[in-house]
Amino acid sequence: MVADRRIRWTLGCLLAAVLLGGTFLLGTVAGNRLATANPAAPTLPGPLGQVTVEGGTDSAPTPGAPQDRDTLFAPFWQAWEIVHDQFVDQPVDDVSLMRGSIQGMLDALGDQHTFYMDPSEYEQSNIPLNGDYEGIGAWVDPDTEFLTIVSPMEGSPAERAGLKPGDQIIAVDGEDMTGVDGNLVIRRVLGPAGTQVHLTVRREGESDALEFVLTRERIVVTSVESRMLPGNVAYVRLLTFGDETTPALRSALDTLMAEEPVGLILDLRANGGGYLHTAVEVASEFIGEGPILFELFANGSEQAYPAEPGGRALEVPMIVLVDGGTASASEIVAGAIQDTQRGQLVGETSFGKGSVQVWIPLQGDGGAVRVTTARWYTPLHRIIHGIGLTPDVVVPAPEDGLSEVDPALDRALDLLTHPSP
């Protein structure tokens, strides 16, 4: 069972980070809080395979083959001694060298979602996926060439300023962010409410960079919004997949289902994701049986996540609203509903985040490593990573992004209140 795992899994677009308050916060944390994990973490697959001690050898190692650890690390320790003996600025900072070595090792894996967090970054990433923070209020992906907006949060400074999904932050307060790690860029965007930050943004289709000056605010993050719409249609919007999302959703569904609605709209637009187990719980409220998703691991093994019993909205006709900001855990739910033909997807193609990361704390207050451990697939074994989910009914969002007209919602209402024969 997911709940029995000591290590909490995250899918946030972790992205899903959010520009609000923390290393992975730009609106709400899309990171992962870890239960106590075994400091002696299991060996992870990498370019050299599992490193084991089997006796020395003078021959060159075969890529991917195990070899003697002393032989393998001899060049590393040689470089370590050279730095301590010959580097001009002494003494060197051994802790920084150690942390840099870990980061370099993880960078060598070539996976943008696998990286090292120092103790300060790791502490901030443990903030839960619900609360209030100070910043500009936008889901972001820190693992791209430039910090990229996944979606601005509704009512946030980012939304009011006109930031859009796909915008890349290429400078902060006039300082070029080329080559700067996205998690460090996040720190520069964060700041106390009432202060300003100047963002230079590269946007697809625009020949020149765009300039935005935003005033940071304290933004309260909630998981679930719900109400009844005209035509006796229930509406539920999920803003994140955090610790409180499932109980809040169940409470909302109890209230809405008592109205005996003719249909239900689940709005996952601009939802950057969160916890895997929350995605399974949420999907299970609408899907009564069968797999919600599959995970495929490095050794070729596969794990199915079945629907959990007790769903509150298993029969009511439903539609899921998606867009380019629908990512990760949101795509698990949307993909499961589409594959099981439980409902239709309406809107725009989703973000396309189909990998699973685990954050493992290191010994001696050494920070943590975030490692991609699996790929996930929809119930029909569709791959969505880098592709996204294509809606059953494509409805483009308004061009300006600020219009009070909501064509996707209007189309969903029409489909539920005037179903095809």
Image (cartoon, rainbow, N blue to C red):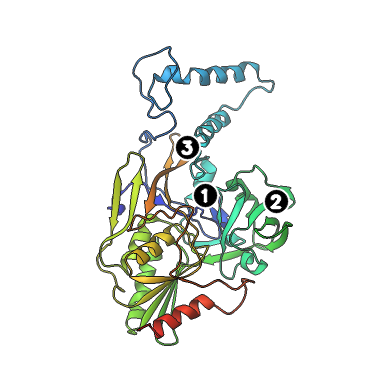
Residue hosting label 2: 171
Q: As displayed, is residue 261 above or below residue 66?
A: below
Instruction: Give the residue drawn at x 52%, y 49%.
Output: 124
Front disc: 3 or 2? 2
* Amino acid under disc 1: Gln
Mark 2 neighbour class, 10 Å CA radius: few under 14, some 14 to 19, many 20 or more:
many
What's the distance in space between the residues labelled 3 and 1, CA to CA?
14 Å
As rendered, which of 201 and 123 lies closer to the eye?
201
Q: Quadrant of the C terminus?
A: bottom left
Q: Earlier in the sequence, mark 3 or mark 1?
A: 1
Where is residue 342 drawn, in percent x and y?
Answer: 33, 70
Give the labeled residue for mark 1.
124
Identify the residue at horizontal 60%, vertical 67% (top origin). Answer: 156
Q: CA distance from mark 3 to mark 2?
A: 32 Å
Badge 3 element = loop
Lower position in the chain sequence, tag 3 or tag 2 = 2
Q: Residue at x 54, y 43 (%)?
A: 120
Residue 82 lies, in percent from the top left, at 60, 17
Which mark is on residue 43?
none
Earlier residue among tags 2 and 1: 1
In the displayed structure, 357 sits above or below 307; it is above
Residue 219 in the image: state x and y as whole percent. Answer: 57, 65
Label 3 with label 1: CB-CB less than 8 Å: no
Q: Label 2 amino acid?
A: Ala
Report the amino acid beneath label 3: Asp
